[in-house]
Image (cartoon, rainbow, N blue to C red):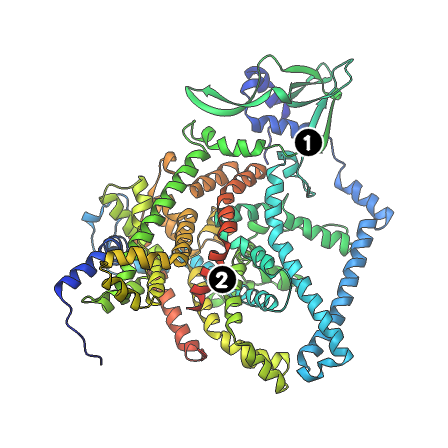
Amino acid sequence: METLPIEVIETAAEAAGPATLPIEVIETVAEAAGPATLPIEIIETVAEAAGPTTFQLVLRILVALFLVVHVTGLGFLLIHALSPQGERRTRLGLISRRLGRFFIYECLVFGSIVMTVPFYWMVVTAFKDAETASSADPVWTPQRMEARFTPPGGVDSIPVHILGIRNVGGVDMATIVPLENFHFRRITEGGVQITRRVPDPDTTMRVPAQDIERNPVISLAVDNFFSAWFRPEESSRGEVNFLTYFFVSTLTSILATTGTLITSAFAAFAFARLRFWGKNLFFYVILATMMVPGQVLLIPNFLILSKLGMLDTYGALIVPWLASVFTIFLMRQFFMTIPEDLWDAARIDGASRFRYLWQVVVPLSRPVFITAGIFDFLNNWNSLLWPLIVTSSPNKRTLMVGLQNLNDDAGAEFHILMAASCFAILPIVVLFFFLQRFFIEGIARTGLK
Amino acid sequence: MQFKEKISLRENMEAWAYLAPAAIILLIFWFLPVVVSFAMSFGNITALKPFEDMEFVGFGQYVTALSDRTFQKTLWNTVNYVLYSVPPTLVIALCIAMLLNTKIRARGSFRTIFFLPYITTWVAIAIVFRYLFHREFGLGNWLLEIISVDLLGLSSAWRLEWLQEPRGIWEMMLWGPLGLKIGDMPFGVDNIIRGPSLALGSIVVTSVWRDVGYFMVIFLAGLQNIDKSLYEAASIDGANGLEQFKAITFPLLSPVSFFLLIISMIGAFKVFVPQFMMTPTGGPDNTTMPLVMFLYQEGFTGEWKLSFAAAVAYILTIIILLLTLAQNRLFGRKVEYGQ
């Protein structure tokens, strides 16, 4: 990360007054003011002189044990796999079977760790501050550096935020503000309302830097989530924040999904149960379009939308996705399994086809509706390329485009990015845990057809 | 042939009324674009030249694309991505599915854990892995440091540039340590020997991590569909585990595997988001940029060379179609569809 010399920032801070200083600058100063670290060479020499540390010894012994156990274990397992079922009752067979079960659990647990560590890391980092998030040694708990100041003569220290440190006459003086007076506020800057973390006026203090203690503490403060949520306001002059993105994504995804389910139900019913000219031909044409990659459609669709005057509208995000070949196909397969006798019974009772579809077929096909709905919703929610191309104004950005913008904008501020990633995936993870059965069954079914 | 009853006009009208909503959308946004795109790829539309003023340039755009160095490079990157991500994903997924198909506890929880990455969005995952592969504060380099310093007792830690590393993975892992220098070779053979850049390798790791769960779920469903009595019969006949896999599991799983191979290859050819998010500029020396990202850059930024992008899209389509056909030819006949 490129940093300005402290003096420049300090002078700027002095000139502008602490309240208007952007967070990043303050953060940089705080980082620069952190405890000096020993040069690497010194640390290495010390380590070599002292021999391996306890951690290194334990690690080496564990890895050696792991290798020994697994090499012999693999041998046993091979014998187990290659011995016919009948010979497995021997002692060797029993040992290798137990070992095999142990291995299965071990592999699965190891795999689960690999799968979950990135998620854990994302959540933990979302609670860290910039300094902890960018430390070379990973910090596995949600920590941040806390600066505390003990007022002269006082007994209790108070947590403070350092706005800047400046050398005055050979003494480092810190400009601080008590943390309780440091809030997210809507302020007017350049005629635009934006949300930014600012100190209450008149609560800043200037104290000797040596009176301030900085220590890592475990903290679950949600500052990063606020910063990430309101970050787009700063980059686009107060027009939008993640509330806008969530609104756009939710609105377009729900409308497009509902629309797709309705149009597809009608079309699938026609293909499954009605007779008409050109049915087979049309069905094969539809199946063939499943082969065409979406990228081919990207360019002409862009032109078509611009001819229809729909570029940069919600319509551009919804209308092209109001029908899905895949959903039609999925529903048709399901409708075909509904016995024809039901239609005969319904007809005798005087029901029209339309009534039969809505009162008999649709309720019977609830699982396929939920599965198809999930897929359509996820497709819309997760799409990046399409909204990137057809929308341009900030208030029509979907969540994914917003996240992509933040990724460009926040660069290496991973604590902010992780917080944004957290709230971007939260709705989907919640949805998944409620509808897990349909997710997994739906995917399994599409694979087996 | 079955005798066909005559279909009345009324019946036809009713059916078409049911079809109409979906058909109109599909017609405008799916069928029409295929044709328009095809026509466009033979023209010269850019931001300055609207559709109405299009001039026909024949195969000009295709020729330009195929002889463009960046295009060739992105095509090569895409092929590398497909070759290095699809087989590991399928093999690992099959292994996990087979482990989960045994009598174990907490199968549901394991399945959920492995499946979770697939439902979280690519954009967020790409950001998280960009952090993990960061050269200064990523967990990747931390792990390397643990291995090199603490485990092997080296005095200085191994560090990699990950997403900023243009050198090929084989160049770094094999040829470099062996002291071999890879010079320029005809027909780009040196690129094959060097392997994909570490930057692309990191992205491949990310996508394997994400997709394994999806394929695992389908494999697991396929495995559970296999009749258990077949295994019982085989073990009574004295077949061992390996023989059972060769004679029962593998052939009965082949339709599922074949389906997964095709859809995963098609999907991998269309890859865009991970590269776009993790290496927005196309990676070091353009070694990660896939075809679709090239298409986006050429067609929707800068000069908006829409016709050129359409030609690129068609080349991609042709590649995908040929691949699917070839796979059908090669393996399609050998796939056993069981009972």
Badge 2: few (under 14), some or many (20 or more) residues near its Cα, within 10 Å?
A: many
Q: Which of the two discs, 2 and 1, sits closer to the camera?
A: 1
Q: Chain of mark 1?
A: A
Badge 1: few (under 14), some or many (20 or more) residues near its Cα, within 10 Å?
A: many
- The residue depicted at 54 percent of the width and 79 percent of the height is B248
Q: Residue furthest bottom?
A: B237
Residue type at tag 1: Met
Query: Foreground residue, A76 or A339?
Result: A339
Query: Foreground residue, A274 or A129?
Result: A274
Query: Foreground residue, B130 or A83?
Result: A83
Q: Are marks 2 and 1 on the same chain?
A: no
Q: Which residue is mark 1?
A: A145
Quadrant of the frame with the N terminus of chain B: bottom left
Quadrant of the frame with the C terminus of chain B: bottom left
Left-right relation of B287 to B96: left
Question: Hey, which quadrant is residue B148 in on the image?
Answer: bottom right
Task: Residue B39: tell me if it is visible.
Answer: no
Q: Secondary structure at mark 1?
A: strand
- The residue depicted at 68 percent of the width and 31 percent of the height is A145
Image location (x, y in percent) of residue A172: 71, 19
Image location (x, y in percent) of residue A41: 77, 42
Question: Hey, which quadrant is residue B325 in on the image?
Answer: bottom left
- The residue depicted at 75 percent of the width and 38 percent of the height is A39
Residue type at tag 2: Asn
- Label of residue A31 in the image: none
Query: Foreground residue, B263 or A219?
Result: A219
Q: Which residue is mark 2?
A: B80
Q: Secondary structure at mark 2?
A: helix
